[in-house]
Amino acid sequence: MVERRSPKPQVGGSNPSYPAIKGLSLRFVIMEKFISYIKNSKSELGKVIFPTKEQVRNAFVSVFIVVTIISLFLALIDVIMSFVIKGIL
């Protein structure tokens, strides 16, 4: 039989998510982590290189052309398969 004990926050390592930190409350630790997260997010966002208008336009045109070609190819295959099925039946 397993003995169950309640976690003791004042004992370091009793709860791995929030280890005991002397002199600091749990709310303070959570707020510090949140502030650190916001600062790191701003820092990472500053490293992002956004595409120029010309790059976005070129990507749009490329995707549009490829989608059009594939659509026409599938429509052609559909027409051919329809004729074949009608010929068999």
Image (cartoon, rainbow, N blue to C red):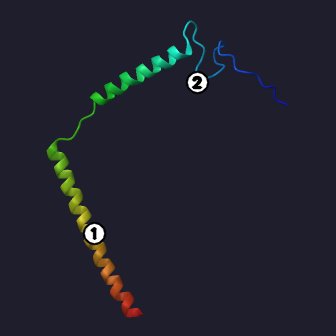
Q: In the picture, residue 25 is in which quadrant?
A: top right
Circle 1 residue: 71
Mark 2 packing: few (<14 Cα in 10 Å), some, or many (20+)?
A: few
In the rendered structure, the answer to whether residue 78 lies left or right of residue 33 reads left
Q: Is residue 4 above or below residue 10?
A: below
For label 1, the SS is helix
Residue 39 x/y as whole percent? 36, 22
Quarter the C terminus occupies:
bottom left
Quarter the N terminus occupies:
top right
Q: In the picture, residue 10 is in which quadrant?
A: top right
Q: Residue at x 31, y 83 (%)?
A: 80
Q: Nearer the viewer, residue 52 or 25?
A: 25
Residue 77 x/y as whole percent? 32, 78
Mark 1 packing: few (<14 Cα in 10 Å), some, or many (20+)?
A: few
Instruction: Determine whether label 2 and label 1 are within 8 Å by CB.
Output: no
Single out the residue that lies furthest toward the left: 54
Q: In this view, does 68 lie above or below 59?
A: below
In the rendered structure, the answer to whether residue 16 lies left or right of residue 29 reads right
Q: How far apart are marks 2 and 1 (CA)?
A: 52 Å
For label 2, the SS is loop
In the rendered structure, the answer to whether residue 89 lies left or right of residue 59 reads right
- The three-letter code of the residue at mark 1 reads Ser
Q: Which mark is residue 31?
A: none
Q: Residue at x 22, y 60 (%)?
A: 64
Circle 2 residue: 17
Residue 23 x/y as whole percent? 56, 6
Q: Residue at x 41, y 24 (%)?
A: 37
Q: Earlier in the sequence, mark 2 or mark 1?
A: 2
- The three-letter code of the residue at mark 2 reads Ser
Q: How many numbered dots are placed on residues in this image?
A: 2
